[in-house]
Amino acid sequence: MEGVQLEKSETSSLCFTIDDISDELKNVIRARLSEICYGAAKASRTSVIYSYEKTLTAFLDKFDTKSADTQKGMIGELLTHVLFLHYEDEFRAASPFFNMEEDSIKKGFDLVLHHKGTSEIWFVEVKAGECGVETSINKLGGLLSLAKNGLKTALNSERHTLWQNAVNGASLVIQDSGLKSQIETLLESFNEKAVAGKSASQDYNAVLVAVCFSGGQAFATGAEFEGRHTTQKDMNEFRDLMSIALQKDTIQSVVDFLRSEVDDG
């Protein structure tokens, strides 16, 4: 994709560097925003509620009420949805970005993925931040550890609502009724293990995402990030692990683009 570099390792680390919000990236955001926020099942409906323009307005309404740190997280999570699912099209989202119960972003797992080939579920945790005085690779490493700890805590949790949110999300997102039932049944089995106190992170596939807004710092290389990924993978705290780095200078050009779309509309 123009404006985006991807370095992918054989050990399942992906390092995205966004040099520019190119026309190609803008078009992917336009095409996918409603699906990301509401899920494919709703996005495919003809109601104006799920149009790009209305979805964008809803996104910015939520964005503008949040703290600076949460805003970074929202942009990081949006870019993760856009880029990961664009490049890794063997996965499909099984959860929406928006929280359906209240006027906020989704609670629970940041993203639930379904692998089309293996039918396995992958749970995603996204952490975002600015480098400040740190090097990009040190910041990415720290964010990766935060994501690991957050996801490990969630997967080891007995919280019924956490898993029910995942089940409900899949029911909203997946269009095919047979596939929907399959994913719901799998997630419900995870829910049963959790409430029985038998849920362990080692039983689940994980995707850890570190989103770094580097400011004036040089971007990390894919090889550097693979080293941080290998450190996490060797801890064997998940059934399988993918790590994603997403690097950009600031969130501002993304926010400016989204706002300009509303103004132009």
Image: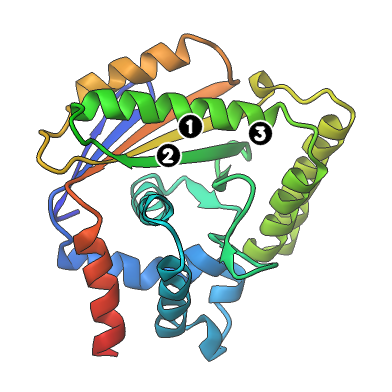
Question: Would you name the residue on which mark 3 appears?
Answer: 154
Q: CA distance from mark 1 to mark 2?
A: 6 Å
Residue 50 visible in this rendered orientation of the protein: yes
Residue drawn 21% across and 27% down?
Answer: 134
Give the numbered dot on residue 178.
none
The tag earlier along the polypeptide, 3 or 1, is 1
Residue 213, percent from left and from top: 24, 44
Residue 75, percent from left and from top: 36, 56
Residue drawn 74% across and 63% down?
Answer: 177
Q: CA distance from mark 3 to mark 1?
A: 11 Å
- Badge 2, how many Cα within 10 Å: few under 14, some, many 20+? many
Question: Would you name the residue on which mark 2 appears?
Answer: 127
Visual colour scheme:
rainbow
**Residue sitting nearer the eye, 25 or 114:** 25
Q: Judging from the image, what secondary structure is the residue with disc 1 in? A: helix
- Splitting the image into 4 quarters, where does residue 215 fall? top left
**Residue sitting nearer the eye, 58 or 87:** 58
Relative side of 195 to 4, left or right: right
Q: Judging from the image, what secondary structure is the residue with disc 3 in? A: helix
Residue 124, percent from left and from top: 52, 39
Question: Would you name the residue on which mark 1 appears?
Answer: 147
Badge 3 amino acid: Ala
- Splitting the image into 4 quarters, where does residue 29 fall? bottom left
Q: Judging from the image, what secondary structure is the residue with disc 2 in? A: strand
